[in-house]
């Protein structure tokens, strides 16, 4: 399993449900990436989205951000645009 959380990168692919990001966007992603529709996240406990500490997906349930590419679940809720004036 590839380690790493809290990263930045460039979007190389988007799913059909992603509305706020497009290929080529510079982005940053937090360590905790909850499924925002889960009961836990809706209740204010994003780190436990889907089960105890299950919001910590990178390096626990799937490859982390030290990989050449990585997947961000619920991209519109878990990514932020990286402003051009900030270097990665």
Image (cartoon, helix red, strand yellow):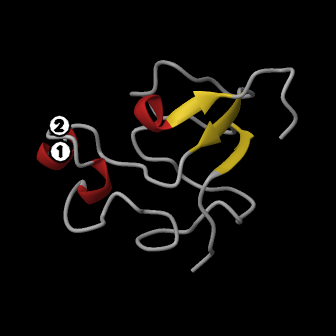
Q: How far apart in space, not on screen, are marks 2 and 1 (Cα)?
A: 6 Å
Quadrant where the C terminus lies?
top right
Circle 2 residues within 10 Å: few <14, some 14–19, many ≥20: few
Circle 1 residues within 10 Å: few <14, some 14–19, many ≥20: some
Question: x%, y% of residue 79?
Answer: 54, 35
Question: x%, y% of residue 38?
Answer: 17, 45
Kind of element beneath mark 2:
helix
Kind of element beneath mark 1:
loop
On screen, residue 38 versus residue 65, left or right, reads left
On screen, residue 69 versus residue 85, left or right, reads left
Question: x%, y% of residue 63?
Answer: 55, 69
Q: Is residue 7 above or below residue 63?
A: above
Question: x%, y% of residue 62?
Answer: 47, 68
Q: In percent of the image, x 40 and y 71: which residue is there?
A: 61
On screen, residue 5 versus residue 82, left or right, reads left
* Residue at the extreme front: 44
Quarter holding residue 16: top left
In this view, the residue in front, 58 or 48, is 48
Residue 56 disc label: none
On screen, residue 51 versus residue 66, left or right, reads left
Q: Is residue 4 above or below residue 73?
A: below
Q: In percent of the image, x 47 and y 36: which residue is there?
A: 75
What residue does disc 2 label? 42
Q: Are marks 2 and 1 in contact (CB under 8 Å)?
A: yes
In this view, the residue in front, 73 or 46, is 46
What residue does disc 1 label? 38
Q: In percent of the image, x 68 and y 56: which residue is there?
A: 69
Quarter holding residue 1: bottom right
Q: In percent of the image, x 63 and y 67: which residue is there?
A: 4
């Amino acid at each position: 399993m590839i380690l790493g959380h809290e990263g930045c990168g460039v979007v190389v692919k988007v799913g059909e449900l992603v509305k706020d990001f497009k290929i080529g966007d510079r982005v940053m992603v937090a360590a905790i990436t909850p499924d925002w529709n889960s009961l836990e996240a809706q209740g204010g406990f994003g780190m436990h989205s889907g089960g105890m500490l299950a919001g910590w997906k990178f390096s626990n349930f799937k490859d982390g951000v030290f990989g050449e590419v990585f997947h961000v679940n619920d991209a519109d809720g878990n990514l932020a645009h990286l402003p051009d004036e900030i270097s990665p």
